[in-house]
Image (cartoon, rainbow, N blue to C red):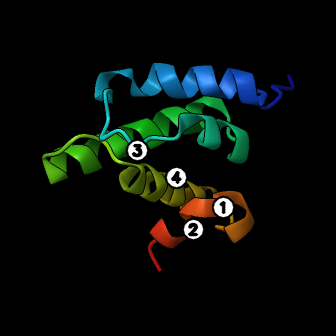
Amino acid sequence: IDFPVPDSTQRLALWHRCLAPLLPGAGDLDLPFCAGSFELAGGNIRSIAVTAAYLTAEAGSPLTMRQLIHAVQREYQKLGRLTLASEFGPYVDLLIP
């Protein structure tokens, strides 16, 4: 059975649904960017949300874009994907070296 990767509109809905418990965030969350730039399946987005929740709890503060980018980077590492500057765009400086 082939499960196609959700399109950006579907991914945006998934980002909102998975991060709802962590919202409102710090105000700098750019979920439309995440939906448009990171071609991920729903399970991967959920995994990122769980990682982001742990990072948020550890920091003791609202969810920030920095934490979300770190969670995406960790998911990419688990998937064996490269973290390309072109995908992370204006948030490439938030990546952990």
Q: Residue furthest bottom?
A: 97
Where is mark 2, residue-wise? Answer: 92
Residue of label 3? 28
97 horizontally vs 12: left or right = left
Depth check, mark 1 against mark 4: the one in front is 1
Q: Choose top left, top right, bottom left or bottom right for residue 76.
A: bottom right
Residue at (53% x, 29% y) in the render: 15
Indicate the position of residue 3 as horizontal and vertical percent values.
Answer: 81, 25
Name which residue type carries label 2.
Answer: Val
Q: Earlier in the sequence, mark 3 or mark 4?
A: 3
The reply to whether dot 1 and dot 4 touch (C-beta < 8 Å) is no
Is residue 55 found left or right of 89 in the rendered image? left
> Closer to the N terminus: mark 3 or mark 2?
3
Give the residue pinned by disc 4: 72
Hey, what amino acid is under mark 3? Asp
Residue at horizontal 66 percent and vertical 61 percent from the top:
89
Q: Residue pushed farthest left?
A: 60
Question: Closest to the observer: 65 or 39?
Answer: 65
**Mark linked to residue 29:** none
Label 2 crowd bin: few (<14), some (14–19), many (20+), radius 10 Å: some
